[in-house]
Amino acid sequence: MRSRLLVKATSGTDAPERCAQAFTVASVAALSGVQVSLWLTGEAAWLALPGRAEAFDLAHSAPLDGLRDDVLGAGALTLCTQCAARRGIGEADVLPGVRIAGAAVFVAEALEDGTQALVY
């Protein structure tokens, strides 16, 4: 059984350290060969849009756009359906490779054998 990491980022620029931790953990896991799924919820939803991660700045943190791209290249990046709808974000607005999915998909991923879920 292959290990899998499910990371839920619930904050963005409103709590930058927590946000950067979620992206850093997801990136490191993806680059280490772990199957990673990073979910953007709440204020983290904005980071699914072009230019948002590039504008994120936190001292002593790796650039968020690079961490995001690591996940996109080696894992899955998902934007919460309801979070997107509340912010007026549609499929045409998000970066290539970002999917929009709801709670049923999150629960299915969380219940897969070998999955460890983390919420930031």
Image (cartoon, rainbow, N blue to C red):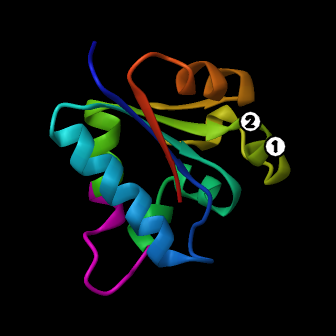
Residue 6 appearing in the image: yes
Q: Secondary structure at mark 2?
A: helix
Amino acid marked by disc 1: Ala
Report whether 11 appears left or right of 65.
right
Q: Which residue is pictured at 59% across the width and 58% down the height? A: 44
Q: Are marks 1 and 2 in contact (CB under 8 Å)?
A: yes
Local crowd size for mark 2, using a 10 Å CA cut-off: few (<14), some (14–19), many (≥20): some
- In the image, residue 62 lies at what x, y percent? 25, 70
Point out the residue furthest to the right here: 86
* Main SS of residues in magenta: loop
What residue does disc 1 label? 85
Q: Which residue is pictured at 39% across the width and 80% down the height? A: 57
- In the image, residue 118 lies at what x, y percent? 49, 48
Whether residue 59 is in magenta: the answer is yes
Whether residue 89 is in magenta: the answer is no
Q: Secondary structure at mark 1?
A: helix
Task: Look at the picture and state if 104 lies above or below 61.
Answer: above
Q: Which residue is pictured at 39% across the width and 65% down the height? A: 21
Report whether 45 appears left or right of 116.
right
Amino acid marked by disc 2: Thr
Local crowd size for mark 1, using a 10 Å CA cut-off: few (<14), some (14–19), many (≥20): few
What is the C-alpha distance between the residues marked 1 and 2? 6 Å
What residue does disc 2 label? 81
Task: Look at the picture and state if 67 lies above or below 3.
Answer: below
Report whether 28 appears left or right of 97.
left
Residue 96 appearing in the image: no
Quarter of the figure with the N terminus: top left
- In the image, residue 90 lies at what x, y percent? 71, 38
- In the image, residue 85 lies at what x, y percent? 81, 43
Q: Which residue is pictured at 49% across the width and 66% down the height? A: 19
Which segment is the magenta one? Answer: 56-66
